[in-house]
Image (cartoon, grey):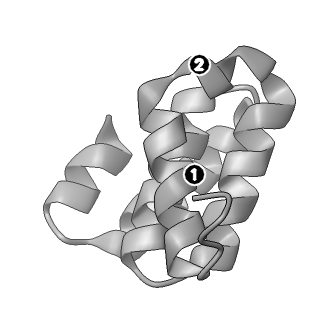
């Protein structure tokens, strides 16, 4: 929640740092991976966003049924000009 608050306050670097700290302690936090993907994608770092989504998927295959995950995945693919998968 602190990372989300920092992101909403437009402190992207601190938000990503908080998410990184959370994920170091518990890499199975799917919501943290998806939020990191969202922040990275909005910041123009699509490679990091794609990596965050892959990590989320690796920890829980059911995440692909989550509409937020699918929206982020398609947004990253659009920014990478992968029109077919998007």
Horizontal side of residue 54 vs 42, given as left or right: right
Res 81 → quadrant = bottom right
Residue 36 seen by the camera: no
Tell me where residue 11 appears, x and y as whole percent.
26, 71
Decide: is 59 above or below 3. above
Horizontal side of residue 30 vs 79, given as left or right: right
- Secondary structure type for disc 2: helix
Q: Please name the residue that numbered disc 2 is placed on.
A: 65
Image quarter of the N terminus: top left
Tell me where residue 47 appears, x and y as whole percent.
69, 76
Tell me where residue 19 appears, x and y as whole percent.
53, 50
The 10 Å Cα crowd at callout 1, few under 14, some 14 to 19, many 20 or more, is: many
The 10 Å Cα crowd at callout 2, few under 14, some 14 to 19, many 20 or more, is: few
Decide: is 42 above or below 28. below
Q: Nearer the viewer, residue 18 or 76?
A: 76
Check if mark 1's residue and mark 2's residue have beta carbons within 8 Å: no
Decide: is 67 above or below 19. above
Horizontal side of residue 73 vs 52, given as left or right: left
- Residue projecting furthest to the front: 84
Decide: is 81 above or below 9. below
Horizontal side of residue 57 vs 44, given as left or right: right
At 52% from the left edge and 55% from the top edge, which residue is drawn? 74
Residue 42 seen by the camera: yes
Q: Going from the N terminus, do you reach mark 1 or mark 2 first?
A: 2
Tell me where residue 72 appears, x and y as whole percent.
48, 50
Whole-Å distance between the Cαs marked 1 and 2?
A: 12 Å
* Residue 73's disc number: 1
At 57% from the left edge and 59% from the top edge, which residue is drawn? 86
């Amino acid at each position: 929640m602190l990372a989300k608050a920092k992101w909403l306050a437009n402190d992207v670097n601190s938000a990503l740092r908080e998410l990184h700290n959370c994920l170091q302690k518990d890499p199975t936090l799917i919501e943290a991976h998806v939020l990191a993907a969202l922040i990275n994608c909005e910041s123009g770092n699509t490679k990091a966003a794609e990596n965050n989504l892959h990590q989320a998927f690796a920890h829980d295959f059911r995440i692909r049924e989550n509409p937020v995950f699918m929206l982020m995945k398609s947004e990253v693919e659009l920014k990478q000009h992968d029109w077919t998968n998007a």
